Image (cartoon, rainbow, N blue to C red):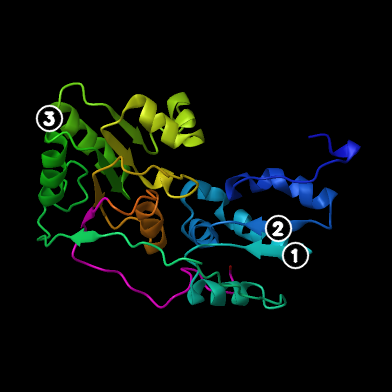
Amino acid sequence: VNLANGGLDFIAGCIDSYHKMEVITQYNPNYQVINDEIDSFLNHLKGGGTLKGRQLKAIEFFKESINNAQFTLMMDANLNQKIVELIKLLFPDKKVMVLKSEPIDKPKTKTFYFFETESKKSEFSRNPKHLPSHLVKVAKDALAKGQKVLWLSDSQASCEVFEEIAIKLIKGIKSFRYDGKTSQQETSKHFKEAPVDFIIKRMLELLLISPSGESGLDLSIFDYFDLGCFDIRGVAGVNTLIQLSGRLRDTLPPICVACPEFSNMTENLCPYPIKKV
């Protein structure tokens, strides 16, 4: 973009590219900011993740860009009071207004089945080769019957391992895995651009999605999948889990859920002292 010739009206990017956006804020001091998926956005800032050694600089850029913006719009379908309070603490000089949207029609609810599972090492452990046996059995039985299965997990390894299981179970199975290892491949780019067409043209029998598909992925495909399986490993936040479970818009297929029998609850809004953030 040639800033010297003006004409720059809009720029989109992720927080990992903050160093490229600094030029924009300096060039046009009257900018406005739109933050989509603000819950996930803040969790990414707090957790670090792909930011690594650039985390503190990214946090400072976020604070500065919002403080100097003419107007900021933050959106999230799962916005909660905790996030609102954190935003107010981070930007005490900003007037914050919360707008809630109410659906015109009562949304159809999904059916979730939570499996009773003992937390054995053979089922839930840090070893990615171990998958919850109850969930695996349900998925394998469905595939053996010719049903189409959507496998979700907050663990990339879970998706990879179950795909290996499915390939051994059914010779020539048409599967596709969208996770951290495949998301940058050319095939994955086609999937992200038009997921419904991709699924139908390839006649997928098994689709596996990790947190790489947490947001921005719209599976508006109906009467296609017969079963959803959700392997929760406890390595992602609640918002990420909700986002993953909502990727498939069809509410008819039941979703079977297996998760470790422990929880980690905290009242802290942020792992760092507020003044540091």
Could you say whether the residue bearing mark 3 is in a helix, strand or loop? helix
User: Which secondary structure class fits the magenta region best?
Assistant: loop
**Residue 204 location, x and y as percent?**
30, 30
Of 200 and 11, the residue lying toward us: 200
Q: Which residue is mark 3?
A: 169
How far separated are the C-alphas under marks 1 and 2? Answer: 6 Å
Could you say whether the residue bearing mark 2 is in a helix, strand or loop? strand
Quadrant including the C terminus: bottom right
| Residue drawn at (81%, 42%) of the image | 8
Which residues are the magenta region?
Answer: 253-276
Q: Which residue is mark 2?
A: 33
Contact (Cβ within 8 Å) of mark 1 with mark 2 = yes
**Residue 47 location, x and y as percent?**
46, 58
Mark found first going from the N terminus, 1 or 2: 2
- Asked if the stretch drawn in magenta spans residue 271, the answer is yes
Residue 142, placed above or below residue 259: above
Q: Given the current orientation, which residue lies at the most extreme right position?
A: 5
Could you say whether the residue bearing mark 1 is in a helix, strand or loop? strand
| Residue drawn at (12%, 36%) of the image | 145
**Residue 103 location, x and y as percent?**
50, 67
Q: Which residue is mark 1?
A: 71
Q: Quadrant of residue 221?
A: top left
| Residue drawn at (42%, 67%) of the image | 106
- Asked if the stretch drawn in magenta spans residue 15, the answer is no
User: How many labels, in total?
Assistant: 3
| Residue drawn at (43%, 25%) of the image | 187
Mark found first going from the N terminus, 3 or 2: 2
Q: Hey, what amino acid is under mark 2?
A: Val
Q: Hey, what amino acid is under mark 3?
A: Leu
